[in-house]
Amino acid sequence: MASRVPEVSSLISEAKSAFLATFGEEANVAVSAPGRVNIIGEHTDYNDGFVFPMALPLVTVLVGRQTKSGLCRVKTLTDHADRPLQVEFKPPSPSTPLKPTTPSWANYIKGVVANFPGVISGFDVVITTSVPLGGGLSSSASLEVATYTFLEAITGIKAKSLKEKALACQKAEHDFANMPCGIMDQFISTMGKQRNALLIDCRSLESTLVPLADPSVTFVITNSNVRHNLSGTEYPVRRQQCFAAADIMGKKSLRDATLQDLERYKTSMKEEVYRRARHVISEIQRTKEAVCLLEKGDYLTFGKLMTDSHHSLKNDYEVSCPELDELVEAALEVPGVFGARMTGGGFGGCIVTLVKQESVDSLISHTLQKYGGKPTFYVCVPSEGSQLLSV
Ligand code: GLA
């Protein structure tokens, strides 16, 4: 059985009760921001390429209120977060800027506070989430974007544009979580739309909604429930290798390179750098093609591109792991499955599978039979980006 996605209303009630119990007052603001699944276009965003994610009904919710206390008091209800689960800090001033410290979960909030354009007099807030932590579904971006949305609500100061909001949240992750991520996760968490995936051009930051409205097919996320430690250290290495490859070819980024360019320069670069670039250049091409195929309803070829993407991530980019490979293999054995691939940064987390609606149950039972670990399944409905909710 696929996991039940908790209702946003129940997350709000849970957070409101905790708020009252913790701070002795009622919360008067509630916001949410979603996690995401990337359908295709992996490790292309920091190469100025294309990505194709959708926002999930799994969300991070913040409830709270503005105060004049000169303190930001934050409590998380997420049991898996590092201790302590409650922190307080002073809003930044020119003489005392905010700095990342422990616990690590609070750095996402501090990072957004530090990058928010308005003055903050203080706030109390409670956080809860249905996005699995560290599962490759962007729990961190959803926390950043929810925090920004909360600050907009309590101060009445809005980002000049949604792009500016996403960029401020990305900067929070770079500076306070030490993760040099691309723009995909913050962008889709801010701009996702119900019933649509979003094709994002990560160079121009222009985006196009692509309807996912056919009831006969669906995307299923399978969480391997494993996370290897490599994810934090290998990401910046991949990024550097891509920049090095572009540099050798005299290109601004790998977005500007073709596979022919790459072949021409093959002998001037390390074999590993060559393979990293081959993944990115081919993945950008696959993503553009895949979106056209989806628009035509050609699921067979679309699914094949998803599976090609997985193999490229596994063999050339080397960011998969045995558990993800096992899950993809199991999925591809099921009649009615069009394609499957790892999704997100890699080294654990989830795969995403395009499957006929009528075959979802067989996909789940076959995976449970074949996969050695304990997977979790989500049947995905493309959902809204960040929102102000009624309390
Ligand atoms: C992580 C990053 C994204 C993106 C993906 C890989 O999720 O946060 O910016 O680079 O990895 O596609």
Image: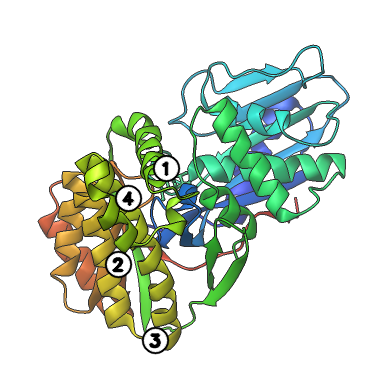
Q: Mark 1 is on which residue type?
A: Asp
Alpha carbon of mark 2 to alpha carbon of mark 4: how far? 18 Å
Q: Mark 3 is on which residue type?
A: Gly
Q: Is mark 4 within 8 Å of ligand 1?
A: no
Q: Mark 4 is on which residue type?
A: Ala
Instruction: Classify 10 Å Cα crowding around label 4: few (below 14), some (14-19), many (20 and above).
Output: many
**Between discs 3 and 2, the one toward the N terminus:** 3
- Dot 4 falls on a residue whose secondary structure is helix
**Residue 87: percent from the left, percent from the top?**
63, 19
**Between discs 2 and 1, the one toward the N terminus:** 1
Which of the two marks, 1 or 3, is nearer to us in this view? 1
**Residue 125: percent from the left, percent from the top?**
70, 33
Alpha carbon of mark 1 to alpha carbon of mark 3: how far? 38 Å
**Between discs 2 and 4, the one toward the N terminus:** 4
Residue carrying label 4: 277
Which of the two marks, 2 or 4, is nearer to us in this view? 4
- Dot 1 falls on a residue whose secondary structure is helix
Camera-side residue of 87 and 271: 271
Instruction: Classify 10 Å Cα crowding around label 2: few (below 14), some (14-19), many (20 and above).
Output: many
Alpha carbon of mark 4 to alpha carbon of mark 3: how far? 30 Å
Residue carrying label 1: 247
Residue at image location 71% in from the left, 23% down from the top: 73
Residue carrying label 3: 297
Residue carrying label 2: 306
In this rendering, would 325 be left or right of 391? left
Task: Say which quarter of the image contains residue 207.
Answer: bottom right
**Between discs 4 and 1, the one toward the N terminus:** 1
Instruction: Classify 10 Å Cα crowding around label 3: few (below 14), some (14-19), many (20 and above).
Output: few
